[in-house]
Amino acid sequence: MRNGTYQPLSRPLFIYVKQQSLERPEVKGFIEYYLKEGPWLVDQVGYIQIGDQGYDLIRQHFAKGATGTLFQDVSQVGLTIEQLLAREQ
């Protein structure tokens, strides 16, 4: 569990999906699998977890059919994925 005292160097791992592709059941199914199994898979390969709140926000983002980046063209250094997703809520 992260308490903020140590933050290893890291960067987010993204997958990008075109809005049109989300209409395909196999693509939608893959994304749902990815979001459901993501925390387990991240642990298996030794990546850094984003936390349950982050996954919940990402699932909400996906359920709304939202696509695109959260980073826009502005530096987001120091913000967590949770903070970026919460801005959109």
Image: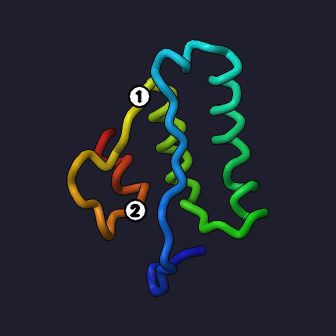
The amino acid type, in three-letter code, at marker 2 is Thr
Q: Position of residue 8 (x, y in %)?
A: 51, 80
The amino acid type, in three-letter code, at marker 1 is Ala
Q: How many labels does the image show?
A: 2
Q: Where is residue 17 in the image (x, y as percent from the top left)?
A: 51, 30
Q: Which residue is painted at 35% across and 48% down in the image? A: 86
Q: In which quarter of the image is the C terminus?
A: top left
Q: Where is residue 10 in the image (x, y as percent from the top left)?
A: 50, 71
- The residue beneath circle 2 is 80
The answer to which quarter of the image holds residue 61 is top left
Q: Left or right: where does residue 67 sit relative to residue 10?
A: left
Res 86 label: none
Circle 1 packing at 10 Å, graded few (<14), some (14-19), many (20+), is few
The answer to which quarter of the image holds residue 48 is bottom right
Please identify the residue farthest to the bottom as the structure is shown: 5
Q: Choose the circle earlier in sequence order: 1 or 2.
A: 1
Q: Which residue is painted at 42% across and 56% down in the image? A: 81
- The residue beneath circle 1 is 66
**In the depicted view, which residue is nearer to us: 21 or 2?**
21
Q: In which quarter of the image is the N terminus?
A: bottom right
Q: Which colour scheme is used?
A: rainbow
Q: In the picture shown, does residue 82 fall above or below 5?
A: above
Q: Where is residue 88 in the image (x, y as percent from the top left)?
A: 31, 40
Q: Distance between the residues labelled 1 and 2?
A: 19 Å
